[in-house]
């Protein structure tokens, strides 16, 4: 079929929306609640376009042959501005002190549309009656803050109710509490968040309503402390999105250089840990498998990968009867951190109490691995914030090699370190099954329970496409 956008003809297909065609043809239309393949709720009303003199949301309006669409006009601009202002009126607007300052989709839109007026909520000096004051108090009384969670921090004062978190969460942890004007996004019965911490909600939140919980301030102190040896361990999967935080930082060598500039004395690639992890995993799988075949006269002994902490949480929570099959081996970064605090400290004659190990990770759930050897885990987004806190400009960053760790590692682990793909590294005589994403994992585990599927090793990753698409990755901010 053929449609016209701003007077120009475009080919379109059945089932596409006006926004789909605009995106494909690079015609700018602002959006906030819409994201990728997520369910389209049409709640922000920023993607308005004009069809036959009427304003409609382009994200949900399907194309039809001969449709004529206008994407920019005074009427559209005014409506988008009012809608943005309405959203802003319910937003904290504390940009300067906000964790997401300069990395916030909502802030970017407000700047593009020059939202400077406060027509819908009076400022403190403008409040003249008790009634107005009570209304503002009411508004703030329903702010829910959860700072206790070790992985995800929540505060509804930044929430614009776009529903992305509700739609992306694979275990449906979020929904609306209360009704009408008092409605607020939260957990059921406002209980503390107790999910699988995959971080998809944080990654997709357009504001700072959901952010990484962590101890960046402590890291800054440690980096400035002459008595502390700060050691960064790079999870190579972070290279998939590091360029969103720092355009131009596109290689491990540049990232190593950036970390050195920030004050890390040593920067290690986690390849050595991956190599040891695979060795330990094979030692766990093969003898048990042999014993199992001998005793049970059965072909396969199930071992489930422990690599993805979210997947482990998922199994322990929803399939507890299978949790005994999860591999006991420590994860690569845990092995790395332990070796840094032990072998490396011994080798270099450093008191391990004066070493801080910081993992730069593409995974939010890895924050749960914090221990006496792995001191801090930060995501790509937090590394971005650290760079901004230190006021460092990585524009003309040079390339330096990461430090060699113990004996280095085999290059064949490079791909695995980037995508967490264990199946291709383990010895091939094993019956291996893979499942990515909660839906696939659930199906495979159900099949195993029904004895419709048997395997020696099950590799499970909660983030679709593995760590390259991990919940700790940075998302490119582009509204247009
Ligand atoms: S209403 Fe279309 S993007 Fe929000």
Image (cartoon, rainbow, N blue to C red):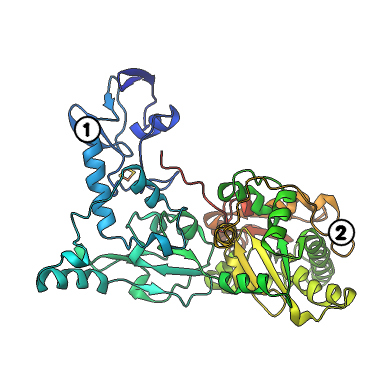
Nearer mark to the viewer, of 2 and 1:
1
Taking depth in this image into account, of 193 and 300 the one nearest to the observer is 193
* Pointer 1 residue: 74
Residue at point 17% right, 28% down? 53
Q: Is residue 389 visible?
A: yes
In three-dimensional space, the C-alpha distance between marks 2 and 1, rounded to whole angstroms, equals 62 Å
In the image, 119: left or right of 465?
left
Give the side of residue 319 with respect to residue 477, left or right. Answer: right
The tally of labels here is 2
Is residue 423 shown to the viewer in this render?
A: no
Image quarter of the C terminus: top left
Q: Quadrant of the N terminus?
A: top left
Q: Nearer the viewer, residue 476 or 165?
A: 476
Q: Position of residue 21 (x, y in %)?
A: 39, 29
Ligand 1's quadrant is top left
To which residue does mark 2 refer? 408
């Amino acid at each position: 079929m053929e449609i016209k956008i701003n007077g120009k003809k475009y080919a379109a297909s059945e089932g596409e929306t006006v926004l789909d065609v605009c995106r494909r043809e690079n015609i700018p239309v602002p959006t906030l609640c819409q994201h990728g393949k997520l369910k389209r709720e049409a709640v922000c009303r920023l993607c308005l376009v004009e069809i036959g003199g009427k304003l409609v949301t382009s994200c949900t309006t399907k194309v039809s042959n001969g449709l004529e669409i206008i994407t920019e006009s005074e009427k559209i601009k005014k409506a988008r501005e009012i809608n943005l202002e309405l959203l802003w009126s319910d937003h904290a607007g504390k940009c300067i002190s906000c964790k997401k300052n300069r990395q916030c989709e909502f802030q970017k839109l407000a700047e593009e549309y020059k939202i400077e007026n406060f027509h819908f909520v009076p400022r403190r000096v403008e409040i003249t009656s008790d009634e107005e004051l009570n209304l503002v108090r009411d508004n703030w009384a329903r702010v829910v803050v959860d700072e206790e969670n070790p992985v995800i921090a929540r505060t509804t004062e930044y929430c614009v109710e776009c529903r992305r978190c509700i739609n992306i969460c694979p275990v449906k942890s979020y929904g609306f509490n209360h009704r009408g004007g008092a409605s607020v996004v939260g957990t059921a019965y406002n209980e503390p968040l107790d999910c699988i911490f995959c971080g998809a909600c944080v990654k997709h939140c357009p504001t700072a309503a959901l952010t990484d919980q962590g101890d960046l301030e402590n890291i800054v102190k440690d980096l400035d402390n002459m008595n502390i040896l700060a050691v960064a361990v790079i999870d190579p999967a972070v290279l998939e999105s590091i360029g969103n935080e720092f355009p131009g930082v596109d290689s491990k060598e540049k990232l190593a250089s950036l970390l050195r500039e920030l004050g890390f004395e040593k920067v290690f690639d986690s390849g050595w840990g991956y190599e040891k992890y695979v060795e330990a995993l094979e030692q766990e799988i093969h003898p048990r498998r042999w014993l199992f075949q001998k005793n049970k006269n059965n072909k396969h002994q199930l071992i489930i990968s422990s690599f993805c902490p979210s997947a482990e949480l998922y199994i322990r929570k929803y399939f507890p009867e299978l949790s005994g099959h999860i591999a006991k081996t420590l994860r690569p970064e845990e092995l790395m951190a332990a070796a840094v605090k032990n072998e490396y400290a011994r080798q270099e004659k450093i008191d391990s109490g004066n070493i801080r190990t910081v993992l730069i990770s593409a995974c939010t759930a890895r924050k749960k691995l914090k221990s006496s050897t792995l001191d801090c885990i930060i995501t790509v987004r937090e590394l971005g914030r650290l760079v901004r806190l230190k006021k460092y400009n990585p524009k003309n960053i040079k390339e330096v090699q990461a430090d060699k760790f113990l004996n280095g590692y085999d290059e064949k682990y490079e791909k695995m370190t980037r995508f967490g793909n264990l199946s291709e590294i383990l010895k091939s005589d094993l019956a291996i099954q893979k499942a990515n994403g909660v839906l696939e994992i659930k199906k495979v585990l159900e099949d195993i329970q029904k004895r419709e599927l048997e395997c020696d090793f099950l590799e499970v990753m909660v983030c679709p496409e593995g760590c390259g698409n991990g919940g700790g990755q940075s998302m490119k901010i582009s509204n247009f």
